[in-house]
Amino acid sequence: MLQIALWKRLLIILVCVWGLLSAAPNLFYGQVERHNDAAIALERGAISTDEIAADLAAWPGALPSSLVNLGLDLRGGAQLLAEVQLGDVYQARMDGYWPEVRDTLRGLRDQVGTIRRQESVAGELRVRIGQPENMQVAVDAIRAIAQPVVSLTGIGATDIDVGADGDVLVVSLSEEERIATDDRTMQQSLEIIRRRVDEAGTREPTIQRQGTDRILIQVPGIGSAQELKDLIGTTARLTFHAVISTNADPGRSAGIDELLHPDMEFEDQFYLLVRSPVVSGDDLVDSQPGFDQNGLPAVTFRFNATGARAFGEFTAVNVGQPFAIVLDEEVVTAPVIQTAITGGSGQITGNFNVEEANRLSILLRAGALPAELVFLQESTVGPELGADSIEAGKLASMVALAAVLVFMVLSYGTFGVFAAIALGTNIALIFGVLSLIGGTLTLPGIAGIVLTIGMAVDANVLVFERIREELRTAKGPARAIELGYERAMSAIVDANITTFIIATILFTLGSGPVRGFAVTLGIGILTSVFTALFVTRLMVVFWFERRRPKQIEV
Amino acid sequence: MRLRLVPKQTNFDFFRFRKITFGGSIVAMVASIAIWLIVGLNFGIDFLGGTTIRTESTQAVDVGTYREALSPLGLGDIAITEVNDLTFAVDQNVAQIRIQAQEGAEAITSETITAVEAALRSVDAAIQFTSVESVGPEVSGELILTALLAVSASLVAILFYIWLRFEWQFSVGAIAALVHDVVLTIGIFSLLQIRFDLATIAAILTIIGYSINDTVVLFDRLRENLIKYKKRPLIDVMNLSTNETLSRTLMTSVTTLIALIALLILGGDVIRGFVFAITWGVVVGTYSSVYVAKNVVLMLGVDREPKKPSDAGTQFADIDA
């Protein structure tokens, strides 16, 4: 008969109450958001001001305060999909290997003869040796300096492959090392992008790795994708080089140990520099915007001990000579060294305005990106459009909900009222679950909720229709209700499992807004089955127990 | 007094005109494919690459002026459409500008976007750019592939699930209904030249979800009745099952349509294409559950000797609340 154990009743009610409570903060979005921000600020050690205290008091701390994240299409902001040019790093690695290879081969000069570095494709080091008959000696010697690969999958492998091509010794990164390097490059890029976005102080950015070489960056509240690109798109590789010529011919080709870079300000002025840098941005510990003695915007920097020593030694022996400060393959400035700079700090003055100086110091502080980023996809949504979408979505959901409720009550009377209450609970549960799992609500997600409003009653309809049918065979109301639930079960389960399969596929293969839709649809299926099978049933049972009707109309 | 969409007891013969309905479905599908091949889909930048810019201004949109302002930039094919919606304020004038992917450019050049914005500002100082979206050709190619994969994966998953829970004939019928729905949706999108983008794919998957839901409910009842009335001809049992579930089928379709129509009218123009696809799919899906899925099962016939008759209809009946 119509019986539900007490513990089940309590559990069902508890879940509903929990759903309502968890969904409640979303009704007071602005207040709760301010409360949460204030709480985080205090946690990070901010000093409590009147403002923070007022924000904190905007929402009682005892209540749940998790909110549904609003997607970029609702909140406004910018999104970029960047591809990391992993190949860039291979070249840098090979350049780094060259001095060691050179020194090793020089030690064997009496056997291998003269050595000369050759032009090569990126990621390869080619060295011609004078006595090719002793190539094996050279190959063995270089193999001996190879390092083991540091990664889980590359155990036992070394980082370089060494081979011979006629009289040319070829050194390249091994497959295992490439995989390990790619992974490191991605980790480093993610970390640096995260630091740069955080330094700029925007809220709740999403920075995710996608696939082997892509990074998805979403920053709510930022004005445009261009702004975001300026912030993270610059490699910001800072290096200090000895200068060979300050007025080089742009048409000349730079030698293998040389670099030819243009001036940042005067595009027709080119510098010829020594390829290996004296110090690089990796040795920077701090950088701040400031002003030089003439009151022009400047960027100050400070080296770590290694950097300071290298820079000190270099400047000591090169007094009177120029050195070049190079940022992303452009010479920012090339001052003449007046005295040895041993303190490990200095400043860059160039053609900056205050804003640029500020941005450059952020970039230098956060570190250089290991490889260039290419942007494959970008989008900007203005906050007004997002707000309009929320308004439209809210209105449409309300109207949809009201219309469905009226229709249900008209069709099923008392039972329709139960279904209506269950539908309300259902929506609260969707928001509750979304808040709990930190899900993101997008515009298609709102459509998913509206669709759920329409479809959620399906399980109820199935049951009610079945009860109607069972009533016709006149078994008495209690038996009819029971049979109605029992017999509708397999249809409800099969129908919802298939829809859930679709939601899962959408979630796995979709991205961004589509994924938001899949999440709300999936949660909606679970909660609607719960409300139809448990919540409505509990209400029916309560009602039946109190009224004990001899006859019912569904 | 209850609102009833169908009388208490119905006895329609759903299969009397099955040659006409089934033939009609086939004609509709052929027509859809023909329109698709001749007119083609209006692909969005998700699939073609390129840039869309949404502008908003207090001044009226003048497509001609916009076009003139942009023509010196030499960006190739530019589509400018004025957007109207009843949710807009009186002085809210919105336009959508679509620029095709630039030849040879893998990534999006921000210079292009900046130049376009500057050109438009020169003809309308009050113009604002509420949304800018760019997709490179590399990504768009992948998106097409992923979309196709998603739709095929869904069909295969459902084929398998229905086969597992019912008989293989049911699963063929269900898939036939789904293919019917997808083809008709592509047809209407080609015919009306509604923008076809990633959201539309999501909508198609949702249609698949809805339509299968409907089909499964019908099949479930059919399975139950096949056990109950072992001796009656298949066509009779089908008619009976369809009549028994008719009220439910219409109730669910109507509630879903009520919700969707509210969204279609009030939800704003940004998701209108998406909502339209789902709304269309609900109508077509309801039809196909009755007239395509079951017709196919009827043609294929059903093995009337169930291996384990006892557990088929009541498999979940012991789950109580």
Image: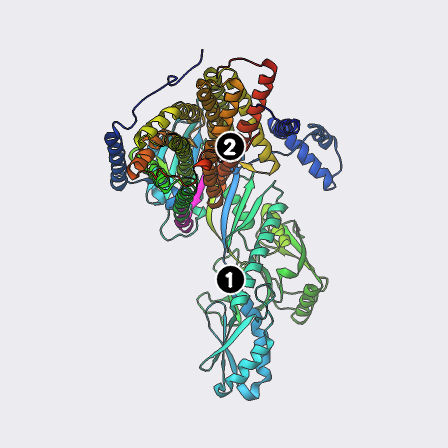
Residue A395 visible to the viewer: yes
What's drawn in magenta, residue-wise? B131-143
**What mark, if any, has residue B94 been given in the picture?**
none
Q: Secondary structure at mark 2?
A: loop
Q: Residue at x 62, y 48 (%)?
A: A358
Q: Residues within 10 Å of mark 1 (few under 14, many from 20)?
A: some
Place of residue A169 in the rendered image (x, y in percent of width and height, measured from the top left): 49, 78
Mark 2 crowdedness (10 Å alpha carbons): few <14, some 14-19, many ≥20: some
The image quadrant of residue B68 is: top left
Q: Secondary structure at mark 1?
A: helix
Q: Chain of mark 2?
A: B
Q: Is residue B46 above or below residue A266?
A: above
Tell me what residue is drawn at x 56 percent, y 89 percent. A110
Please state the horizontal and vertical placement of residue A472, each as a whole percent of the image: 44, 18
Residue B189 forms part of the magenta stretch: no
Residue at image mark 1: A88
Position of the N terminus of chain A, as image quadrant, is top right
Look at label 1 and name its amino acid: Asp
- The amino acid type found where label 2 is placed reads Ala
Of badges 1 and 2, nearer the viewer stands: 2
Tag 1, which chain? A
- Asked whether A349 or A121 is in front, the reply is A121
Residue holding disc 2: B317
